[in-house]
Image (spheres, helix red, strand yellow):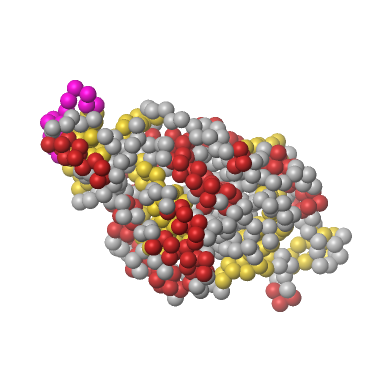
Amino acid sequence: MFNRKPLHECVPELVAAARGDKHATLVVTNGKLVNVVSGEILPGMSIGVYGSRIAYVGKDVSHMIGPETKVVDAAGRYMAPGLLDGHCHIESTQLTVTEFSRAVLPLGTTGGFFDAHEIANVCGLSGIRHMLEEARQTPLAAYLQAASCVPSTGPDFETTGASLGPKDVAEAYAWGQDVIALGEVMNFPGVVYGDDKMIGEIQETLKAGRFVDGHFTWAADDWRLPVYAAAGVTGDHECVTADDVIERVRLGMYAKMRRGSAWHDVAQTIKAHTESGIDTRRMMLVTDDRSSESLRDEGHMDFVVRHAISQGVKPVTAFQMATINTAERFGLQRDIGAIVPGNYADIILLDGNLADVNVVMTIAAGVVVAENGRMTVELAPYAYPEEMLQSVRLEPSVAADWFAIKAPVASGEAGVRAIEVRENHVETHEIHVKVPVENGQIALDPASGLCKIAVLERHHRTGNRSVGLVANIRFRKPAAIAMTVAHDSHNVLVIGSSDELMAEAANAVIRMQGGVAVMSEEGAAEFPLRIAGLMSTEPFETVAEQSASVSRALAAAGCDLNYAFMTLSLLALVVIPTLRISDKGLVRISAAGIELVPLFLEETEQV
């Protein structure tokens, strides 16, 4: 049904259909065409489709209509190309690719560029291959990226379930042209300073004619950004300021402006265009990470485009940032990103004002797949192998004393460094505070606003675990959360204000073979994620509600951060500034590089 044949195989039929010698399989008539190539709105236009591709675009397609042709009257509605997500981790929605498709197709997303490095960190190449095979069974124009940083840094800083290198990347490209790029190169210090593994992966990518995506978090004016670009990195989503966008565009990169569930970067980054006047050809809108809950409550790329328009971007320009710009970034403008003859028939109809981005019909690969917010086709579930459903290699015997922190003094106070969470931002701050010590152990004052944070290694039974401190979780009462969604190594991450509840939450996650558990005086919430400890086997609607139950449980305990689970899940991502935690300990990344740092402060660092 969703046979996306390469263009060269379709040319004879497309030309014949465009002449009228073959009848179109689908025509859409009488609409206002959003032409993202020319930047125009063209009224009274029609589209003729043969199979999965567009054969004709013009005022009149009556010569293509036959008795079997499906005719859709746009009735004056806008006809726009399907929206594309230029950087997304499907695993972060906690949905399978099939259920993700069910969630986003009615919202107008018809394709995307999906970096499967979450599942790769747990299951290696096998995880990417299964997601690719599942994606090929959906209506989406789905392009996967070979994971570049598995692990995100190196074995000195974290333990992952797998390790990939240049040979693995080359193998992934042999699977097909829909493995389109090297996923975000988070180990940017490794690229800048010539790490053999990172340079080798980039070389294999360029040799295969693929693209390299970036992840650069040093300052926009840092002298090492041009060094990074010299390696062939041509796109980057770690833009949080207008200057980040400007400097990347000036170096020939595509700047990806992110509006995820809990990363709200578009409002600042879009100023590169609205205030500084930078040409938008190399500016893209992306989501990066959106939870199933936010897909349900806010939307997907439709929400991001609408948000960009609300920041002062012209509607057609905003659509370009989520269609043709994205397609051109990956060299696919002859397949996706615009309603032009020869391209795949990925078309959305929009009601009302274009700025409202109100999608009422989605056509993917020439098939009407959704109308008025609901799927019109059934998608068969994909069966993941048993080993991917048994990936938590820990016993549910975590005890409260695992989270005790031995102090360097018997009593009094000790100076420590703590991770400070920033709401709606991916980066954290390192703060230095004094904490009370009783009987040789840290004894947190509930009024201090500090919680304990721990990582338990769950892939290889190493027994590794580390415990630190985190600020701005906002628990008002004894509570804890544990999760196997802990970017990117995805060990068991536990945060809490009670050692006993931390143990209960960790044991619940282990018993579920992955997922999220919240424990507090208000009760418990559990969110099973059996597939690699990252994705649910349940339908989108169920997953969204289970995700929402976690949010409600956290809020009841006082943690009212916006989409708190998404923010907390990044606290083990050791390549993002400034301070994080892994199973090896506290990890700090700064302009100088990456290093392990002790919990307790040296004399010269004391507050």
Q: Picture coordinates of residue 353 (x, y %)?
A: 28, 39
At x 31%, y 55%, the residue is 331
Viewer can see residue 184:
yes
Indicate whether 377 appears above or below 507.
Answer: above
Residue 63 covered by magenta stretch: yes
Residue 41 covered by magenta stretch: no
At x 46%, y 44%, the residue is 132
- 444 relative position to 211: left or right: right
Q: Which residues are magenta?
A: 58-70
| Snapshot quadrant of residue 82 | top left
Indicate whether 194 appears above or below 104.
Answer: below
Query: How many badges with numbers are in the image?
Result: 0
Looking at the image, the residue that sits furthest to the bottom is 604
Q: Picture coordinates of residue 201 (x, y %)?
A: 47, 63
Is 251 in front, or is 314?
251
Q: Picture coordinates of residue 550 (x, y %)?
A: 61, 39
At x 62%, y 52%, the residue is 161
Is 485 in front, or is 473?
485
Is 382 in front, or is 406?
382
Looking at the image, the residue that sits furthest to the top is 67
**What predominant SS class does the magenta segment belong to?**
loop
Task: Locate the C terminus by quadrant.
Answer: bottom right
Task: Locate the N terminus by quadrant.
Answer: top left
Q: Picture coordinates of residue 437 (x, y %)?
A: 82, 61
Viewer can see residue 240:
no
Indicate whether 156 appears above or below 308.
Answer: below
| Snapshot quadrant of residue 155 | bottom right
At x 42%, y 42%, the residue is 300
